[in-house]
Amino acid sequence: MKNKFINKYTYWKNIIQIRHNALKATHNHQVRLYNWCNVCKQDYWLIDFIEKRDLLKNNPKARIGLYSIFAPMWLNYLDRSDIRIFVERENLHKETMQQWLHRFLDDKRIDLSLGFDEINHPQYMRFPFWIMWNVFSPTATHNEIKQQIEQMNSPKNHAYENRKFCSFLCSHDDTGRKKIFNQLCNIDKVDCDGHLFHNNDELKLKYGDDKLKYLTHYRFNLTPENSNYDGYVTEKLFEAIYAGCVPIYHGSDNRPEPNVLNQEAIVFFEMGKENNDAIKLIDELNADKKKYMDFACQKRFITGADEIIWGYYVTLENKIKEIVTNI
């Protein structure tokens, strides 16, 4: 009984602290974070999208709350938000996440849910998390997105010389990552600056935790998703592409964003399998500058990718404007 009480006390103490930290981090904004965890600069993407694109001009006193999964949603009854947006940041199809899978689509207190799946519902929009992290600006124009893609597609974004073999940033091994890590280590050293298999400190000591800058010093980046589900693609793959690495990827049934990304420019592997063909290819590319550069310099984004990404911007902007106008 005592342990149960202590566990409950600890749980709610953490929940209260999470909400306090998120609200404190956004106290100068009309758009505020609730149920958020470990707020960092990238978490301001949606805030900047709404505020800097002037989406509240038709209702300048409107207060918007952004909600994630790190606290019970009923706590929204304690806030003073006029508009509530649920932001899906995880694979909700995982067994441990399915309590959130309803996404509050029939909850009158939640105005909009943003996620990875294709769902036809007036309160839902597919807006994958990779758009909101590091690579694409919340204030970008269509032309700026197009220029960003051209830069990532350019051969100038890639190099063989002065790049080490492979990086791998991960905090835990819950999906069999050790096997692919060991296979790659048979080729050359894999630098791990995360908690998992930690053997390097350059990300923090040399690059000041600037992940994109750090990745530009590697030919390959091992970048599996935390879990596999069709359509679930996070920022990891796009950060590798931005930095000019060849991604070694597993996720989204190994068809990540096929209307945006060139699948031929990614090395796919299967978690927990032998992956002989993938390992052989990586070994050959790493040993031969010409072969590596030929592979690396393939365009990462397919024709029309800018239109798809800009379409997400336009649809979200129009949806939020509509909600703001009608409250």
Image: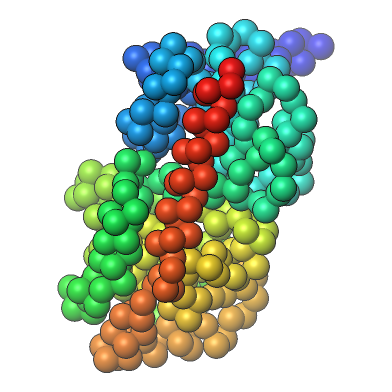
Observer able to see residue 121? yes
Colour scheme in the image? Answer: rainbow
In the rendered view, would you say 215 is above or below 30? below
> Can you give x and y, in whole percent of width and height, for residue 277 in the image?
55, 88
What residue sits 52% from the left and 45% below the top? 315
Foreground residue, 233 or 227?
A: 233
Query: Is residue 216 left or right of 171 when viewed as pictured?
Result: left
Which residue is drawn at the image coordinates 55% and 14% (left, top)? 81
Q: Nearer the viewer, residue 191 or 123?
A: 123
Q: Using the image as rendered, state which of residue 119 and residue 26 is in the foreground.
A: 119
Residue depicted at x 48% and y 88% = 280
State the residue at coordinates (52%, 83%): 278
Q: In the rendered image of this protein, does residue 77 appear above or below residue 208? A: above
- Place of residue 3 in the rendered image (x, y in percent of width and height, measured from the top left): 74, 15
Considering the image in quadrants, where does the C terminus appear? top right
Q: Nearer the viewer, residue 177 or 299?
A: 299
The N terminus - image quarter: top right
Q: Residue 101 location, x and y as percent? A: 74, 40
Q: Pinpoint residue 118: horizontal percent, then vertical percent.
A: 67, 53
